[in-house]
Amino acid sequence: MAAKKSNQSRPHPKVKPIGPFTLALDIGGTGLKAAILDVKGNMVTDRLRILTPEHCPPRLMLSKLKELVAMLPPTAPAYNRISVGFPGVVREGRIYTAHNLGTQPWIKFDLATALQKQFGKPCRVLNDADLQGLAAVGKYGGKGVEMVITLGTGVGSSLFENGRLLPHMEFAHHPLRNGQTYEEQLGDVTLKEVGKKRWSKRVRIAIQTLRDLINFDHLYIGGGNAEKIKFKLPPDVSIIPNTLGMIGGIYLWRD
Ligand code: BGC
C-alpha cells in the first residue's frame, strides 16, 4: 500500500544528522505512522503513514508495522532504538486497553518485547497522549500544571506538573455531558456526525470542564482534528502540531 509522506520538522538537508537514531512509531486508531529521529528529535526521514486495519489484534499490528518500517527509504540512517505511542493504557510496555483497536486481544500483551524481538532493537512504549505531552511540555512549557488533550479518532489526555508526567490519566472514557464520555462527545466519529460547529461547541464545554476540574496553568490541544476548532482559544489554551506525536519518541530515552 502506498504510504503518505509529510516532511514537516525535517532538518535542513545540509545539516548532518547525529545519532543515536530512534525509530518513532505512532499507532493510531486510523493510521500507523513511522519516521526516524536524530538525537535532537528532528525527523530525518519523511513521516510515512498507512491505514490501521479495523479491529487490529496484536499479531496483525506487528505485521502492519513490519510493512510500514520496510517502506523507510534505504538511505535512512540505521536506527538504534524504537519508541512507540500507543492509543490505550500502557504499563511497563504491556497494553491494558485499546478501545479503538479492539481491547480484548490486547489485554496484558507485551508490545515492547514483541517489537524488540521483531526489529532486534530496544523498544519503549507509552500511551500516545502521554508521549505527545512529553514533547509539548518539553518544547513549550515545563512549568506548573500543564494538560494535553488530543482530538483524533479517540480523545487522548495527559497531565504534567513542572514537566513531570502523571501517567495513565484517561479522560476519554469518563463522562463529559448528557450521559456521554469525552470520546463519545469529541471523537472523530462524532465530529463527522454533528459537523464542526456543534463539535466545536462541545470542545468549548470540555475546555471549561477541564479548567474547573484540573485548574491547569496551560492546556495544549493536539491531534489531527485540533485545527477544526472554530472559535478563538483563550490565552492559556493552545494548539500544538500533530508531529509532536512522533517527536515525543525522543523523550522516552531521556531517562
Ligand atoms: C484511549 C486513550 C488514547 C486516546 C487517543 C482513547 O480511546 O483510551 O488511551 O490516548 O484514545 O488515541
Image: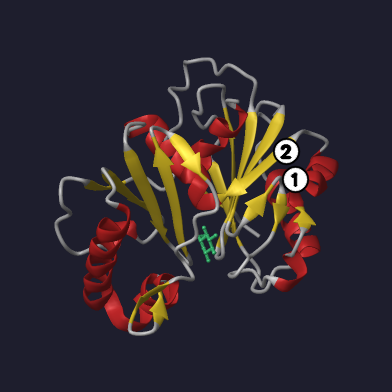
In terms of depth relative to the viewer, which is nearer, 117 or 33? 117
In terms of depth relative to the viewer, which is nearer, 44 or 254? 254
Neighbour class for label 2 at 10 Å: few (<14), some, many (≥20)? many
Q: Measured from the top left, where is residue 216 in percent x and y?
A: 29, 48
The residue tagged with tag 2: helix, strand or loop?
Answer: strand
Query: Which colouring convention does the figure follow?
Result: secondary structure
Q: Measured from the top left, where is residue 196 in percent x and y?
A: 26, 73
* Mark number, residue 20: none
Asked if the residue at tag 1 contacts the one at tag 2, i.e. Cβ–Cβ closer than 8 Å, the answer is yes
Residue under the image location 50 percent in, 36 percent down: 247
Which residue carries the number 1 mark?
112
Residue under the image location 48 percent in, 66 percent down: 154
Q: Is residue 36 visible?
A: yes
Q: Is residue 244 visible?
A: no
Which image quadrant: the N terminus? Answer: bottom right
> Which is more N-terminal, label 1 or label 2?
1
Residue under the image location 35 percent in, 75 percent down: 191
The residue tagged with tag 1: helix, strand or loop?
Answer: helix
Which residue carries the number 2 mark?
123
The image shows residue 165, relative to residue 30, as above or below, that is: above
Three-letter code, disc 2 = Cys
- The quadrant in which residue 192 appears is bottom left
Residue under the image location 70 percent in, 31 percent down: 81
